[in-house]
Amino acid sequence: MKKQLVTVAPAVAMTVVSMVLTLAVVVMWLGGSMPWQIALVVGLGLDGGWLATLAYERRLAAQGDHSTPVTAVGWGFGVLATGVLVAHALAEESTGAWLAVSWLPLAAKALWLVHGLWERTALTPVALDAIRGIQQEARDEAAVARARLRAQAGTEETRLTAVTEAGARVARIQAETAERLSGAWSTLEAARQGEGTARALTCVTDRVTPGAQPRWELPVWGPYEPVPALDAPALSDAELDRIVTELHTSQTPPLSYRELSLRFRAAGHQASETRLRAAWRRVTTHTATAP
């Protein structure tokens, strides 16, 4: 009920002011040319018709009904009252002041229209409480969803940061390891290619194998592809020595053990690394000691 007063009170106030103003203007304007009693009747008739149509419209609205002819008659009385006020303003010296209040009948009618629209859309307290509950539930769900998204975003950011830092650490360790291995390999290569290395090995092996020039082979560093086992029968020592001799003497200068081993495997022969290295040593020793 208190909320209804928000729209009905201005409409009632505007209606009273409009009726009083219209009645006063009609009496003052027509009182000079006819008895004031007649002018009063004219003013009351104008206001009465306006008020009667308004009352009937309110009754239909209370019943949930609406009548277009009654509404048209009501607006007609409002336009007529406004026309009377405008005609009176044009006949007076202070035209602007009277024109400023000539819109009151139509304004009162518009306020009653607004009040009728409010009544047609008004809801009971139970419905309003239900709507407020639904809105609050939607706001709660939206807040929870926003919090969940923020938490997921924070977790994902933390995970990506940790993965990035771990990847950077792995990359640094790999770079440092590669640098150390490269340095060690360079040191081994320099020692292998050095002139003092051959002389030192010759001094050590001269009394055992006179005239031998041993060659220091570097270990294999890097990825390799294992050769799948073949179904060929195992080679005897004589056959293995023959194959190694052919491979060793197939190129000048003779092949190193590493190159020989690769060609031996590539040719499809099968032998253990121990037997192949022993055969290579026999062949190289024989070659070195041969006249």
Image: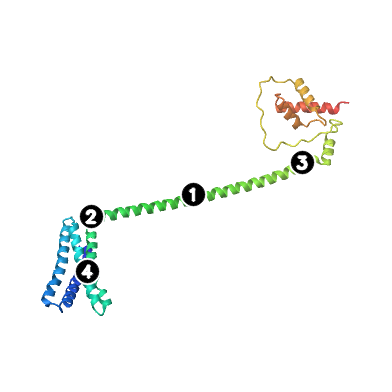
Along the polypeptide, which appears first: circle 2 or circle 3? Answer: 2
Residue 189 in picture, x, y percent from top left:
77, 41
Q: Which residue occupies 36% across, 51% down?
A: 141
Residue 105 in picture, x, y percent from top left:
22, 69
Give SS at disc 1. Answer: helix
Along the polypeptide, which appears first: circle 1 or circle 4? Answer: 4
Q: Nearer the viewer, mark 2 or mark 1?
A: 2
Along the polypeptide, which appears first: circle 2 or circle 1? Answer: 2
Give SS at disc 2. Answer: helix
Give residue 280's quadrant in the image: top right
Q: Nearer the viewer, residue 17 or 263?
A: 17
Mark-to-mark CA distance, 4 and 3? 111 Å
Q: Which residue is mark 2?
A: 126
Which quarter of the rendering shows the C terminus?
Answer: top right
- Pointers 2 and 3 in contact (CB under 8 A)? no
Mark-to-mark CA distance, 2 and 4? 37 Å
Along the polypeptide, which appears first: circle 2 or circle 4? Answer: 4
Q: Which residue is mark 1?
A: 156
- Pointers 1 and 4 in contact (CB under 8 A)? no
Q: Which residue occupies 60% across, 48% down?
A: 169
Mark-to-mark CA distance, 3 and 1? 48 Å
Along the polypeptide, which appears first: circle 4 or circle 3? Answer: 4
Q: Nearer the viewer, residue 230 or 16?
A: 16
Q: Which residue is mark 3?
A: 189
Can residue 199 be seen from the camera position used here? Answer: yes
Q: Which residue is mark 4?
A: 105
